[in-house]
Amino acid sequence: MSTNGFRLPHGGLPHGRLIDRGREISFTFDGRAYQGYHGDTLASALLANGVRVVGRSFKYHRPRGIYGLGSEEPSALVRLRTGARGEPNIRATQVELYDGLVAHSQNNWPSLRWDISSALGLFARFLPAGFYYKTFMWPGKLWPHYENIIRHMAGMGRSPEGLDPDRYEKRHAQCDVLVIGGGPAGLAAALAAAESGQQVWLADEGAQLGGASQGMRGDEGDEAVRKTIATLESLDNVTLLRRTTVFGKYDGQLYGLVERAGDHLASPAIGRPRQILWQLRTKQAVLASGAIERPLIFANNDRPGVMLTTAALGYLRAYAVRPGRRAVIVTNNDSAYEAVRILREGGVEVAAILDHRHMTEQRALPGTETLYNHAVIDTAGRRGLTSVSIARLDVNGDAVPGSERRINCDLLCLSGGFTPSVHLYSQAGGKLTFREDIQSLVPTSQVPGMTVAGAATGNFIPNTAPPIALGRSRRKQFIDLQNDVTAGDVELAAREGYRSVEHVKRYTTLGMGTDQGKTSNLNGIAVLAAALDKPLADVGLTTYRPPYTPVTIGTLAGRDVGTFLAPTRRTPMQACHEQAGAAFVPAGLWQRPHYYPRPGEAMADAVNREVLAVRQNVGIVDVSTLGRIDLHGPDVAEFLNRIYINGFKTLVVGMCRYGVMLRDDGMIFDDGTVARMAESHYIMTTTTANAGPVMAHLEYYLQVVWPDLRVHLTSITDQWAVVAVAGPRARELLDSLDSDVEFANQALPFMAWRGGHIGGIPAQVFRISFSGELAYEIAVGADHGRALWEMLLAAGEAFDVAPYGTEALTTLRTEKGHFVMGPEADGRATADDIGLAAMLSSKKDFVGRRSLRLPGLLPKGRLNLVGLVPADGTSAIPPGAILLDRAVAGPGMDKAGHVATSVFSPSLDKPIALAMVRNGRQRLDQPLWAHSPLDNRIVPVTITGPIFIDPQGERLRA
Amino acid sequence: MLLIPCPHCGPRAQTEFSYGGDANVARPPAPEDADGGTWVDYLYLRDNAKGGHDELWQHIFGCRRWLRVGRDVVSHEITSCTELAESGA
């Protein structure tokens, strides 16, 4: 195995606890083959192979390396896998190595080594903070050109190619205690809770429990942690979730967890999900998420080889990888002195430790230079660190002129103190207070249901000196490596007048990358505080929001994709429609037949044929989707009287009545028919789309407003199959069936209903009509729907019966001038607008009646339902067109109304439309111009009444 | 996601419920006698007070009852959930 000497040999040291040297693994990075060990991350394996540059940065395309150890990583983002499984912007530090892993660097062209856009670095002073808002604003005409260039350069990574082949699952669970973080604090909390008999869940984002300091606690500490893990594993009331990130805290003690169940494999095991979204409700949460080390800010602090000290130690101890050969450590706290010992123990030469502080009692080992009052002021190395420039600091924290010198090194460890990971605590509404001694914001308020433990509290964090800004530098001092935000950008924002940290964040994009500023937020605030000359505590922190780390959309979608996105509702006659070759159209969740094309027929041909069949002969249509509500009780008549605008007290058993209901604001809410089935039993129909809302509306008035009314409601939509038989020969067709129902006018007049049998099937026959023709709606139990349909088709053969779909239904009702909910009654239409003023009862109160006297609802000046015909008799009227009083369209045009429904009427052999026109009923026969902004067409039209066919209603009473 | 303790069905997730607004807005008992201002206030005017809020929720994927729910609009804590009649509405 080629390691270039970066991988420590197996020896007496306890290094490499996470790797299994017995299991070698092959992988490729940018097409080159490498070897690693089982247990490696992609980051540790790349370091072991001496790969230092792993990507190019977002804005300036600067070479970047591995900077952190886990989810805090800002710069080592790679594209993992290929094709449909390819995924951009994956942190190399969290990718578990598997055999055959393929990864690519990002943001470089033509190659990582020779990136053309890195030439951008040469004119980078033209890309300051907020450059999007400045450079490209003017002149506006050139924006499309700028946009082209920006689109090409902007963004990180590429989307996967093709549909995601993997499965994702959602699971729900409950527990007593959720422990977030599997370090020593979290393990101890989990054990204590488990021993008291509670149901405990513990989640950790790593593959192994034990926390970030694994291998650094000494043998005794590690052994204790191992024992705790073993105990927890043996307990029935403990669930341990590895590779699981708690990414969000939501209301009602609900936590969002993503378990990367299959990401450590080349592909998930067959039948297993790739990731699982857990929605976990808990009584109590323990936040033991630890703390993240902060970098320090100086010129060119982003070169490959610059690394957080904890990361360098982690690679060395947990993965047995030397992150460099010769190191310099720069610090402002005491934690780094132990790092000198650990690095040297692992065979890394430590040239010097620089301490920002003026006085300290710490002292490194002999062989390592200890320099107080010193800082790194610059770095060098084209494709990775080769040396650092250091200088002595004066009492103000500025470099003393003439004190500069260089130290050669290939590793620079940054130790700028620690920031508690309080994201979830903040999401839960917890307040943070700035602690001077550790230069961090720490939790200080009580959050119901959450306890913070371990380093996340700010305890166990060493005393830390304030971050220093090393004076003005023309060279880049990076704060946010992922978004390429520099100290200069933050200072510029302050000079330009930005004061709020939230505004500075948005203007500079500080902390807005996929790492959510885990390493950069606090340093950004420190630089802003210095620029504004305010105490850091007064600058505040930007709001933490979920998710803690990115969650892929596939996980949030789970299995709710494709046909599983929403349930599909099918009527009992679906199979019949499919056999007939119907084209289907979605109507809410329903799939309804749109039209039934015969061989060689285009849609328009089929629709025209179906319409003419109903007008001249007979057709059948499946109307099972209409909402059906069963009402029982002694007060139903009174209830209906209050709900509908027209009276229902005079409706007798055996008859039906059309009704319109309003919302209390006076707008039409729904329409349908009600049949009185028995003394205290009624059946109401609603429109297809409003079946649910009408039910809720009725329940609201019964339960909240009039609880004294004795009415019982049941939705029975799904229990019935309903077919409308319509057309001048409808009665002939029904008479030919084996039925005990009398269909004659005297026995079953318009708006009556009768019960009986058709072909032995119990049926209810309602003499109601939507098409304007002689029509019967036959309702049978859902299980009999198919039999009824087939019976009608068979008997109808002699009459050349035509099944018709929703498109013909629309044409028929438009010809008849029937409004529907949506196009005409769009939630802004009153009964008078639609021409139903005569239905408004003057003898009773009803929902919405009081609103009709409000000034805005008085009839004058409102939009009225009217008909339109093209002035030339032939031009189609554009659907949705704007209606104008003049043939001129453009800015400032006065709108007279709009086209609601536009069809070709085969009965009249010309296009017709229904429209809402201001004062339309007073404007019959006047001209208007229908303007479609979509195709910039203007069609001259003439206003007519809305009823094009049989205005006297003789056909439906025939 | 809120957890609402339905008095009939037990604690259930918010997604089973439909929100119905301020529970203390009463429909004028005789709308025709209400003056325009009173009616418009009933239709459109709602307080947006910080803190406790009595509100209506319908358990649409459960018992379908309209319920009175006490909720803190700041912390989203649910303090009560009762039948309307029990709470004296």
Image (tube, grey):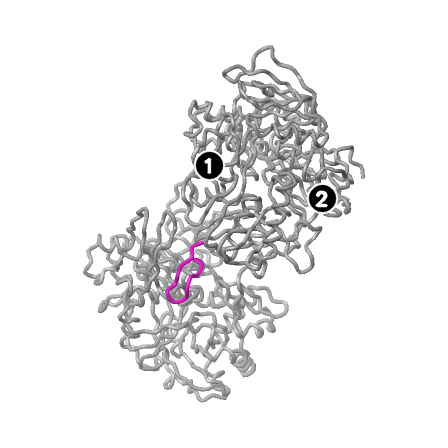
Q: Is the residue under label 2 in contact with that under label 1 (CB below 8 Å)?
A: no
Left/right placement of residue A98 relative to residue B69 reads right
Quarter of the picture holding the N terminus of chain A: top right
Q: Mark 2, chain letter?
A: A
Q: Residue at x 75, y 48 (%)?
A: A99
Q: Nearer the viewer, residue A745 or A829?
A: A829
Residue B15's place in the image compared with A638, above or below, is above
Q: Amino acid at mark 1?
A: Val
- Residue highlighted by disc 2: A19
Question: Quick one: SS at disc 2?
Answer: loop
Tell me where residue A585 sits by quadrant: bottom right
Bounds of the magenta segment:
B1-14
- Residue highlighted by disc 1: A442
Q: Nearer the viewer, residue A734 or B8?
A: B8
Numbered badge on residue A935: none
Q: Residue at x 36, y 85 (%)?
A: A746
Left/right placement of residue A745 relative to residue A127 reads left
> Does residue A850 show up magenta in the picture?
no
Q: Amino acid at mark 2?
A: Ile
> Does residue B6 show up magenta in the picture?
yes
- Residue A907, percent from left and from top: 47, 68
Q: Earlier in the sequence, mark 1 or mark 2?
A: 2
- Residue A557, percent from left and from top: 56, 54
Residue A338's place in the image compared with A741, above or below, is above
